[in-house]
Image (cartoon, rainbow, N blue to C red):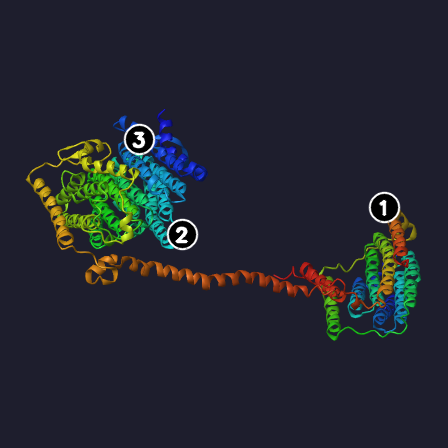
Amino acid sequence: MNNILDHIGIENYIFLSVLLFCIGVFGVLYRRNAIIVFMSIEIMLNAVNLLFVAFSTYHQDAEGQVFVFFSMAVAAAEVAVGLAILVSIFRNLGSIDIANLKNLKG
Amino acid sequence: MSPILIIFYVLAAITLATAFLTIYSKNPIHSAIYLVICFFSIAGHYLLFNAQFLAIVHVIVYSGAIMILFLFTIMLMNLNKEDEVHKPRITRLGAIVVFCLLSIVLIAVFVNSKTIVGDYDTTGEDFQSIKKLGTVLLNEYMIPFEYASILLLVAMIGTVLISKKEKK
Amino acid sequence: MEKNLVLLLLLTPFVGFLFNVFFGKKAGKNISGIVGTLAVTVSFVLSVYFFMQIKEVAEPIKLFDWMSVSNFKIDFGILLDRLSILWLLFVTGIGSLIHLYSISYMHDDENMHKFFAYLNLFIFFMITLVVGSNLLVMFIGWEGVGLCSYLLIGFWYKNQDYNDAAKKAFIMNRIGDLGFLIGIFILASLFSTLDFTELKEVILGGTQNGNVFWLSAATLCLFIGATGKSAQLPLYTWLPDAMAGPTPVSALIHAATMVTAGIFMITRMNFLFDLTPFISNIIAIIGAVTALVAASIGLVQNDIKKVLAYSTVSQLGLMFLALGLGAYNVAVFHVITHAFFKACLFLGSGSVIHAMHHEQDMRKMGGLRKIMPITFVTMLIATLAISGIPPFSGFFSKDEILMTAFHFNKPLWIIASIASIMTAFYMFRLIYLTFFKDFRGTEEQKHHLHESPSLLTFPLIVLGILSLVGGLISLPGNSWLNHYLEPILANKHEEHHFGTTEYSLMAIAVVGGLIGIGLAYSKYIKQAFVPKSDNEITGFSKTLYNKYYVDEFYTFLIVKPLNGLSNFFRETLEPALGKFVYGFGSVANGIGNQGKKLQSGSIGLYLFAFVIGVCAIIIYLFLAQNIA
């Protein structure tokens, strides 16, 4: 079977992944709504997963995909817990504006 | 222009566009929908790589579970209308600057590293079918596999605990 | 056995000190006085014992190893050779007499036990000074006697003037001590030893004769130390002010013992001073000039103790003159006779002051000889001795000094003779004003006049007898003292050949003394002259009365700039330093305040910092490697 990267080229995937990651970062810094921030974090995680799979195909190695597997598991767990915390905050503060979470000010 | 390249470009365009729109749209429900579409496109990328298992799992876990969670939470908090106060102008400008900076830095790293472009490995050997994946997963990565289950258990318990309503 | 007795000699006064410090108040005045006196008497008895056993050459007795650094070793040792035993005899002897005297003199004072404690401590340190086997142990004693001098001068501490006098004495002593220390350092670096016997061997061995510059520097510094302790020009102004202390203190410390420490030190190191004739010349000149200057100031003083103080400075000047001319045995002789008659004079003046209820101005005295006969007779004997009238002891010692001066350096002889004539004049002035004519004080004082109790007069009698016969230890032509001191001195001076020159010099000296007495008689008895009160003194007398304004000069030259410097430090430098140090805190505070803004609590800022940090790390790790 041919390596698909013969046709597409690994640099394309690298650029795509980097751009996606940077969009995620941009989203984290730009928005004040905690939910949107979470979503941006998911975008970042996905960018990395994509790159892993690309390199797994590049090196013809299964280990990249195994890592993605675990990454997804962790992402799922993290989202669950994170949303629970968010709901908790919402119950206490009434809004999920991250500018209101200033108790650590020192 | 081989057809695969065209497919790649289309998928990539969808991914980037939806990702951007996720961040940019004012309504959180719209953001969630855009994100779902983004995840689907990434699943499409995985299919391009012939990683079928991963693609299916990706769709199930991300689009199926995580985004549903998000949507439920958004609806729980009744965030349909979005009247979010924007961050101060300087912060937004800073965010844009950082975005550019980070992208430039990361791309520069990759460009400066010596990528061996050329002969890709093509051993013809199966390296990523479900069979192979399962073998690798359950042989070398047995212990992380088990730990992953514990992790999920803990996450579940934690979530239930945190989101319990306090008894008055 | 020897070692134990030596330790007993050294430590008994110290034990007396401790007793009086801890138990003096409880034991009561009499017991503390008796214990103090006994402590010194024990030392005196032991010194007599050692005197009986005197040998030609003494070995140092080592008490313990004190310090040793590579090839430089100092032990804490005791050297009981002829010189130290001689000194011990009169220090502890006169010391015991004065302790006896103090039991009665200080009886009205509430702090009598403290007085005896300090006196005992002083004797302890003086003994340490005298018996030390190396320069450093001597220095311990040197410092210690300076300290006790300070404590005793400022004994009546409630009067601020007395405290200032005590401070002045201590500080001037200190200046001298600095010189002494530098001398010790130079000697230590030159010879790697400070032990007297070793130094004597090394120096007499003659290998150092080429190094005259450093030897002169060492002797000059040692002499500066002696200047401070023995009140010579320019460090003499503390001695008249030290009369603020009680009279027994003046008698003991500032007449008989502490001020002789300088002469003792120079005599000990005579082999060194012989090698530096230039410095010895300077010593002689300073001694002679001091003698003249102090005598001239003493001519017009009205406080009985101040006259005696200037007389002490003057006589010490004569002793240094002898030392400078190389005649160490002559100086030692004069030290001994001076101790006798000066102590007698001071104790006698103390008796007078006691009778006059602490009045010290001679213009208010007069006609006391009928009321206080014992005091009068003893003081007259001592005054005749100091004026150099034969056959009293002072004649022999002063005459030897004048003869030595005549042989070596005639201008100095002239200066010394003038000083001696002046001495005779003002001492008899003191006698006439105090004891003759009519009483010039108040009626109330007249009623209280009486002869002093026996505890006060007994020491006077003893010292009077010693002043009378003390000359016997060194008669011209047959000097026991010169033979006795021979092993100590490096150069053996030949005995004076007694020809016509010597006899005519003796005659000149006696005639000079008689002239002085005659002048005093004519002014104060015949003309019944009474010195004017303070604001009526004019002309040159005023300069003399104000001590040539030397104190004012020192204040202007040294004290005022020092005070100015202190004020500068206090007003300017210390606040500046304070601000500087405090500034560190302020800077830290400021930085902290600015840094506090980083912890704003806003998550957005934290995330921002995250990303910037990651960029920075990546840039550093991956991209910056290729540059440079």
Q: Chain of mark 1?
A: B
Count up the numbered dots.
3
Camera sees residue C243: yes
Look at label 3 and name its amino acid. Ser
Say whether residue C189 is left or right of residue B70: left
Report the quarter where the N terminus of chain C lies: top left
Q: Give the label, 1 or 2, closer to the camera.
A: 2
Look at label 1 and name its amino acid. Ile
Badge 3: residue crowd in 10 Å (few <14, some 14–19, many ≥20): many
Report the quarter where the C terminus of chain C lies: bottom right
Q: Which callout, 2 or 3, points at the residue further toward the start of the chain?
A: 3
Name the mark on residue C47: 3
Q: Are marks 1 and 2 in contact (CB under 8 Å)?
A: no
In the rendered view, tell whether residue A28 sits above or below residue C119.
Answer: below
Q: Residue at x 32, y 29 (%)?
A: C46
Residue at the disc numbered 2: C158
